Amino acid sequence: MTGGISWFWGLLAQAAHGGGAEQDVSAAWNAHMLEEVADAHHFSVPFLGIEQDLPLWPPLHVGSLTVDLSPTKHVIWLLIAATLCALTMVWVARRTRARAAQRAPTGLANVIEAFVIYLRDEVAMRNIGKGGERYVPFVLTVFFFILFMNLLGLVPFGATATGNISVTAALALLSLLVIEIGGLLHLGPGRYLRTIVYVPEGLRWYMQIPMAIVMTPVEAMAKLARIFALAIRLFANMTAGHFVILALVGLIFIAGASAGSIKYVIWIGPVLMAVAIMLLEMFVALLQAYIFTMLTSVFIGLVRHPH
Amino acid sequence: MLLASRLRRRIAPLVRRLAALQAVAGLLLFSAGPLFAQEAGGGGSPVFSINPGLMIWTWVIFLLLLFVLRKWAWGPILGTLEAREKRIQEALEGAAREREEAGQLLEQQRQLLEGSRERAQQILAEGRKAAERLRSELLDEARAQKDQIVARAKDEIGRERDQALEVLRRETVDLSIAAAGRVLQKNLDAEDNRRLVEEYLERLALERGKVS
């Protein structure tokens, strides 16, 4: 995410020569922050000397919808996260299996195992209840995939795919599918329908009908709203952290463009704050992956055990 | 683990309530999205725009990852975990079972020891009783034997005395006869004298019997 800083120095120099207006620098930095966080058809890791324009494929037209499947920056980071996740987990699996007979797990394998056990027992099984075993692989994959994506945003020059609303929306929609189809299969069509068309028990039929009419949109809305919240929460948390760090770093440049001699010491505050936010971000990366997974499990459990 | 579960119990409702709040906030934010976008300068902010292509990419990559991990990671890891949990459970159960067995064995041993101690006491008591009985029996027997011997000795003494008396009497008779023969050699038949003396002696014996 700090990939653009070197590029920005050039811009800063320009601004400084052109009259040294702090407003110019801050406006330029605003644009740059958006560019850092937003998706692009350009993949660059300046640290490794990678500057690559991604291919543009002609968009597909499905009905009225235009789908542009050309790979973007976030697609690349999705792939990197998925690959790293797969490699790590397969390695852990091999190590676990190879050592299982002889001794207790150590190192990374042990850490991952602790996560796996916690997610299986405390997140999946506890919230979903009996029959939750079938959801464990899904829950584990969601958690680790999101975690890897979140953490990649903290790596220098990395980007967070979960800082893109399309990615989180896609993940949330997938959760919606798993939740609702799982509920449908578990409850059967009749009982599943009653999780949408809410018919309160213990009321006369002439009261039940208006209640159902009133409550049904609410129930349906609730189902969508919590999925929506799932997508927005992850996206907002990941984006916000980056914006905060970028803004703090931007303060240095804006101060640097000012005339006073204060510009030689002003960097200390933003750097310290940026470090603190970075540490917080590491926690947030873990927490948001956990919350997304946890809430998905809770919702699966809610559908399976209606009212 | 206890701490974690307690923390979870505290946090879970909070997270749920927060989730509801965030849902509302998110809806507001999202509905305000286009506003932000316009402010950012026409066409729509790249941060808030939904790209269906990227969504499809996400699905494809996620499903692929799910497939790969399910097959090569979660399967083995969960399998190993379950196997290990089962093994530990079995080990614990085995230990409990063995402890119980050991306890039973100990109890058995203790009972056995107790039994043998009792048995030893019993044997000792029996032995003592038998010895006592034997002693008294032997004593009785000895006493009886002594009595018998004494009686027999008395008998014998009596008999010997009688015999001796008999012999003495006969000797006395013979001696008396011999002495009297010498005195009355001439007129008295030895046979007649003898009969006379014997009659006399018998009478004497009778008298003495009466006296004694």
Image (cartoon, coloured by chain):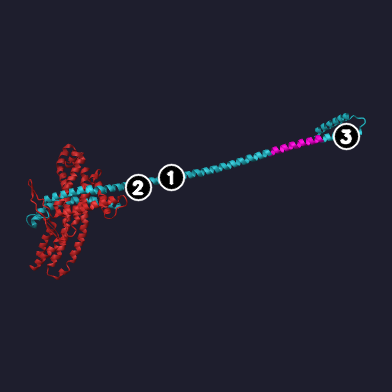
Chain colours: A red, B cyan
- Disc number at residue B105? 1
Q: CA gap, disc 1 to disc 3? A: 104 Å
- Residue A219 located within the stretch drawn in magenta: no
**Label 3 packing within 10 angstroms: few (<14), some (14-19), many (20+):** some
- Residue B166 located within the stretch drawn in magenta: yes
Name the chain letter of the residue that bears numbered label 1.
B
Examine the rendered structure and indicate whether residue A130 appears above or below residue B174: below
Write down the region rendered in magenta.
B146-167
Q: CA gap, disc 2 to disc 1? A: 20 Å
Is label 2 in a helix, a strand or a loop?
A: helix
Identify which residue is drawn at 20% across, 42% down: A183
Residue tagged by mark 2? B91
Amino acid type, label 1 = Leu
Decide if residue A97 is in sight here.
yes
The N terminus of chain A: image quadrant: bottom left
**Apparent side of residue A185 relative to residue B106 in the rendered image (left or right):** left
Viewer-closest of A287 and A86: A86
Amino acid type, label 2 = Ala
The percent position of residue A100, horizontal first and vertical second, equals: 30, 50
Amino acid type, label 3 = Ala
